[in-house]
Image (cartoon, coloured by chain):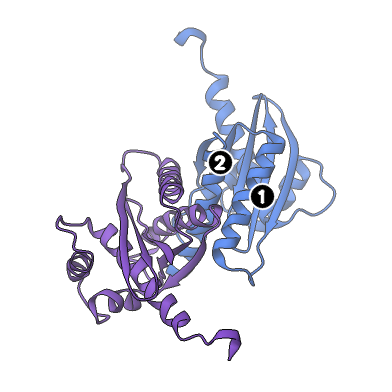
Chain colours: A purple, B blue
Amino acid sequence: MVRAIGVDPGSRFTGFGIVEGDGFRLKYIHHGTIRLPASRPFAERLKMIFEQLGAAIGSYEPQCMAVEEVFFAKNVKSALSLGQARGAVLLAGICAGLSIHEYSALAVKQAVAGYGRAPKEQVGAMVQRLFRIDSEIEPNAADALAIAVCHLNTYSSKNRWKLPDGK
Amino acid sequence: MVRAIGVDPGSRFTGFGIVEGDGFRLKYIHHGTIRLPASRPFAERLKMIFEQLGAAIGSYEPQCMAVEEVFFAKNVKSALSLGQARGAVLLAGICAGLSIHEYSALAVKQAVAGYGRAPKEQVGAMVQRLFRIDSEIEPNAADALAIAVCHLNTYSSKNRWKLPDGK
């Protein structure tokens, strides 16, 4: 049984989702969104991400963290903001001793929607259906749950077929 | 007397410099460079920045942190890397309770070299001369010392002329 926290970093909303998998079944544990008030200095917002994510990790004890790879952004300014938020997310994970895993946006969408070019809304709807969650999930948290699912699927398919003793 | 740590974040080298000022004189305290091996996963490098900067703050007890504002980068990819490193730097400061101050590259160069368009090598030479340091200073650490000087100059000129009791 592996418990993973998926995180979708952002400088306004950082979503996280915790999912457990045993190689066959997936179990929803928790999700949430860290809302970062634009009125607060940027460094304080980073602290909020670091602390609130650290608190969620402390409460739900995942063993690993999954995040999306980022290769592009609207412009250099938004890449810098996103980079700073992402830095706080990775630090919260690694300071808690979690292993860090990165997946492309394509792989994440494929994991929950079946194909890589699915629109953002579809990811949310698929995550809701997958875990039988009635209420709408905030988009960043839905993405985060999808990232956790992507990791658990990848992890279990890697391990399910592993022969004992390297045979 | 105010003690400031200036930091120049980078995903390969993060320099820091600690300087004390009483509004008239500046006193060199310490400087160093955190070298981040390219062979290590990025999240581990962020942890090295966070921990080693945290250790320097713990040892030398500055009250405030100064960093350069960043508005541009070579491209989106390097902006993301720089953003992540900068996030780790800001977090190390704010988690230690330091106030965070940002200055433009222009203001930093002006503070040590007298004019804003000074080349990078000149900043190093001016910092060496200012603090009577014989050995060459690694460029990121020299920049970090210049950022600390910029903050202490700005801080003291703001406070030196403040009239008592708001008169």
Which of marks 2 and 1 precedes in the sequence? 1
Inspect the image, locate mark 1, and give the three-letter code of the amino acid beneath it. Gln
Residue at (48, 61) in percent of width and height: A63
Residue at (40, 63) in percent of width and height: A76
Where in the figure is residue A88, as x and y percent of width and height? 47, 52
Q: Which mark is residue B93?
A: 2
Please state, as top left, top right, bottom left or bottom right, where the N terminus of chain B lies in the image: top right
Work out whether A86 lies above or below B30. Answer: below
Residue A88 in view (yes/no): yes
What is the chain letter for disc 1?
Answer: B
Residue B114 in view (yes/no): no
Q: Residue furthest bottom?
A: A167
Q: Where does label 1 land, which residue?
A: B52
Where in the figure is residue A126, as x and y percent of width and height? 20, 70
Please state if A65 lies on the left or on the right of B9 as rendered. Answer: left
Circles 1 and 2, Cβ within 8 Å, touching? The answer is: no
Residue at (21, 57) in percent of width and height: A137
Q: Which mark is residue B36?
A: none
Q: Secondary structure at mark 1?
A: helix
Where in the figure is residue A93, as x and y percent of width and height? 49, 56
What is the chain letter for disc 2?
Answer: B
Q: Which residue is nearer to you in this view: B58 or A3?
A: A3
Category of crowding for the residue at label 1, using alpha-carbon neighbours closer than 10 angstroms: few (below 14), some (14–19), many (at least 20): some
The image quarter in which residue A6 lies: bottom left
Inspect the image, locate mark 2, and give the three-letter code of the amino acid beneath it. Gly
Please state, as top left, top right, bottom left or bottom right, where the C terminus of chain B lies in the image: top left
